[in-house]
C-alpha cells in the first residue's frame, strides 16, 4: 500500500514556533515516545499535525537559523526528539534511534528529516531506504519551500535534495537522468542491490570529487591516503562493519575514513 499523498505538507506541531518553544516541545515529545515504548515497544504518531501554510519556509539545517525568536518550522529539531528519547534509556540508545527512524520514515516529515540528517550509518542499504522514503512522499513534500545551508535562499524539493543528497546521484547515477526524482529512483535501486565490489567502484568514482576537501595539513601520509590505487587496496582490508559505514559513498564518511586510515599508518 502506498502512503496517502496529500495536496498539502503537514508537519508535527512540536516543530513550529520560536526556537526555545520548539526545544521544549521536542524534548517533551521524546519523553512521550520513551514512555510509549516502555508500554508497548513501539511509538505512536505525534498528537497533532499542522499544515505548512503557503509562503512558510521549513528550516532543514541549523546553520541558517539565526533568529531564535522567529516563529518558524524547524524540521532539523527532530534531532532533539531523538536525543530526549535516547536519554531515557542510554544503554539502549542505538536500538531506540533505529526504531524511531524505521517508524517515522513512514511519514513525509520523517522521510525528509532522515534523508537530510546525515545520521550514521550511511551504508548503501540505509541510504537507499531513506531515499526511497522521500520518493514515496515526493508529491506531498513538493508543497514545501526549504532553507538548508544558504541564508535567504528558499529551495524547492528538487533543489533541496540536489543540494543535500546530490552526492548519492553522482555516485550511483553518474550518467544523469530526465529529472531529479528519476535519478534518485535509479540511484536508490542500485544502492539497494549493490555488492561490495560495486560499492568499491562507486567510492573510487567519487574520490576526485571528495579529495579536494581533504585538509592535507592534518595528514601524515598524504601521498598514500589520496592515491586511488592505494584506496582500492585499503578498501579490500576493511572488515564488514567498517566497510558498510562508507558503502553508501557519503562524502563525510569517506573523509572520516581517510583520516582514520592516515592515523592507522602511524602505527605500522
Image (cartoon, rainbow, N blue to C red):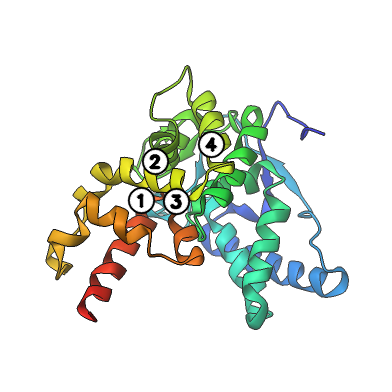
- Quote the CA–CA distance across marks 1 and 3: 18 Å
Q: Are marks 2 and 1 in contact (CB under 8 Å)?
A: yes
User: Which mark is in front, 3 or 2?
Assistant: 2
- 126 with respect to 136 (left or right): left
Quarter the N terminus occupies: top right
Residue sitting nearer the eye, 229 or 163 = 229
Question: How many neighbours does mark 4 have within 10 angstroms: few (below 14), some (14-19), or many (20 or more)?
Answer: some
**Number of marks:** 4
User: Which mark is in front, 3 or 4?
Assistant: 4
Quarter the C terminus occupies: bottom left
Residue 36 position within the rendered picture, expressed as x and y whole percent measured from the top left? 82, 69
Q: Are marks 1 and 3 in contact (CB under 8 Å)?
A: no
Residue 215 position within the rendered picture, expressed as x and y whole percent measured from the top left? 18, 60
N-terminal label among 3 and 2: 3
Residue sitting nearer the eye, 204 or 94 = 204
N-terminal label among 2 and 1: 2
User: Which mark is in front, 2 or 4?
Assistant: 4
Identify the residue at image location x=45%, y=20%: 177
Identify the residue at image location x=28%, y=55%: 231
- Quote the CA–CA distance across marks 2 and 4: 14 Å
Name the residue beneath numbered marker 3: 61
Name the residue beneath numbered marker 1: 251
Question: How many neighbours does mark 3 have within 10 angstroms: few (below 14), some (14-19), or many (20 or more)?
Answer: some
* Residue 169 vertical position relative to residue 85 in the rendered view, above or below: above
- Quote the CA–CA distance across marks 3 and 4: 28 Å
Residue sitting nearer the eye, 39 or 182 = 182
Q: Secondary structure at mark 3?
A: loop
Name the residue beneath numbered marker 2: 167
Residue 266 found in image quarter: bottom left
Name the residue beneath numbered marker 4: 190
Amino acid at each position: 500500500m502506498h502512503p496517502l499523498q496529500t495536496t498539502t505538507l503537514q508537519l508535527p506541531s512540536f516543530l513550529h514556533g520560536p526556537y526555545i518553544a520548539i526545544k521544549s516541545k521536542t524534548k517533551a515529545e521524546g519523553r512521550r515516545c520513551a514512555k510509549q515504548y516502555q508500554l508497548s515497544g513501539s511509538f505512536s504518531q505525534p498528537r497533532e499535525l499542522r499544515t505548512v501554510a503557503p509562503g512558510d519556509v521549513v528550516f532543514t539545517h541549523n546553520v541558517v537559523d539565526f533568529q531564535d525568536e522567529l516563529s518558524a518550522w524547524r524540521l532539523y529539531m527532530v534531532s532533539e526528539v531523538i536525543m530526549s528519547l535516547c536519554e531515557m534509556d542510554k544503554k539502549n540508545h542505538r536500538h531506540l534511534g533505529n526504531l524511531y527512524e524505521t517508524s517515522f520514515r513512514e511519514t513525509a516529515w520523517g522521510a525528509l528529516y532522515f534523508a537530510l540528517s546525515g545520521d550514521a550509518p550511511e551504508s548503501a542499504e540505509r541510504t537507499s531506504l531513506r531515499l526511497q522514503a522521500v520518493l514515496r512522499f515526493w508529491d506531498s513534500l513538493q508543497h514545501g519551500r526549504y532553507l538548508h545551508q544558504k541564508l535567504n535562499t528558499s529551495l524547492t524539493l528538487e533543489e533541496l535534495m540536489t543540494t543535500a543528497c546530490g552526492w548519492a546521484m553522482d555516485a550511483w547515477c553518474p550518467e544523469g537522468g530526465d529529472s531529479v526524482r528519476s535519478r534518485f529512483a535509479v540511484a536508490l535501486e542500485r544502492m539497494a542491490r549493490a555488492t561490495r565490489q560495486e560499492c568499491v567502484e562507486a567510492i573510487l568514482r567519487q574520490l576526485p570529487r571528495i579529495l579536494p576537501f581533504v585538509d592535507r595539513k592534518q595528514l601524515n601520509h598524504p601521498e598514500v591516503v589520496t592515491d586511488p590505487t592505494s584506496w582500492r587496496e585499503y578498501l579490500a582490508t576493511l572488515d564488514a562493519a567498517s566497510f558498510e559505514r562508507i558503502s553508501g559513498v557519503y562524502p563525510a564518511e569517506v573523509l572520516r575514513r581517510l583520516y582514520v586510515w592516515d592515523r592507522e599508518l602511524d602505527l605500522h
